[in-house]
Image (spheres, rainbow, N blue to C red):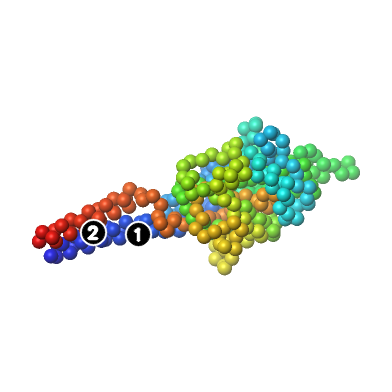
Amino acid sequence: MKYQFARTSISLALLAAAASSGAATTQTWDLTASFTPPLHANTITYINANAKQLTLTAYYADSLSNGNTINNVNETVGNSVRTASLETATRNATLKTTNSSGVWAGIGSFGGSGVGISNPRDTPATSGQENSTGGQHAIDNYDVYNADVYQSGRRIIRAGDVNRLTAESHAHDFLLMDFKEVMELSTFRVSWKRFANTDIDFFLSPEALTGSTDLTGSNIQTLINNGWRQVSLQNVTSCAITDSSASCPTQFSSAVSGYSAGMQGRYLIAAGMLGGNDDAFKFSQITMNLPSGGSVPIPGTAALMMLGLAGLAYSRRQSKTA
């Protein structure tokens, strides 16, 4: 009898271990850690305390598929207006990682502020460069000047400068996050923003998209047509990575436009508001939850379950023959 009890106990313990390994867990990635080398790259992978990987890729959009630039918003920076014509143009603009000259958009690490993007439209146009002026090294949606601007014979704006009056074209940064498996939205943190009214649009991939993906050549409107979901937040809070106040980190909740409980996907895009031109921020933290139902069991979990069930079946047969 005592041996049967022992076998049953072991089997139950194996089942409990399998169940706990498939239970919901919270996964957080701190993006304030420096990475070298390289200091700037188009794609960066972070590994959290649970050995879960998060890969970041920098994209940008500044032109339509026919090669025409995105029309400028014709608004002074700071108006925080979602202009319909600019939003439509940006939704249909081609996502890319490099320009025609091979200059690529780079992700930069800025210590406690988090990560930002320098795209080829930022000045100077050098692959992966760190622009330390004007917020150009942040994740932004700034308007861009295509030519020098003079006033009373004096140059007041250089070609490529951003956000000084109105502009001639528009460049938009997009940060793609790949969690390697389907996860639920939880919280995020921004530790630097240039303007108080900074707004962020997120785009979450459909749950069915579980394989690898490359957004190059696509556009936001096509992604939405294919099941990506938009979640939008206005006047995002900026706080240090160590801040644990009630407003930090920012929760994905019912108060967020487009959000519903349990939203999940493998990929998440973060960008300044589509249709705006005054959003610049650095992304410092993202937290996701493994679905409560568990993702596809890992081999170790499946093995524990099989061993536990086999043990219970054996114990029952032994008790009947005793």
Residue at 59% x, 46% y is 224
Is residue 53 visible in the rendered structure shown here? Answer: no
Q: What is the number of the mark on residue 20?
A: 1
Query: Element type at marker 2?
Result: helix
Mark 2 or mark 1: name the one nearer the start of the chain: 2
**Which element is circle 1 on?**
helix
According to the image, label 2 marks what residue? 11
Query: How would you rate the neighbour count of disc 2 (Cα within 10 Å): few for under 14, some for 14-19, many for 20 or more?
Result: many
The quarter of the picture where residue 250 lies is: bottom right
Q: Return the x and y of residue 297 as percentages of the image width and height.
A: 36, 51
Where residue 58 appears, as percent x and y from the top left, is 58, 43
Q: Is residue 170 left or right of residue 238?
A: right
Residue at image position (41%, 52%) is 295
In the image as oriented, which residue stretches furthest toward the right? Answer: 152
Q: State which quadrant residue 187 falls in.
A: bottom right
Do labels 2 and 1 touch, CB within 8 Å? Answer: no
Up/down of 100 relative to 167, above or below: above
The quadrant in which the N terminus is found is bottom left
Type of residue at label 1?
Answer: Ser
Relative placement, left or right, of 205 versus 120 is left
Furthest residue toward top:
101
> Residue 47 versus residue 265: which sits nearer the camera?
265
* Residue 81 vertical position relative to residue 225 in the rendered view, above or below: below
Q: Residue 79: image x %, image y %?
A: 75, 55
Front residue of 84 and 119:
84
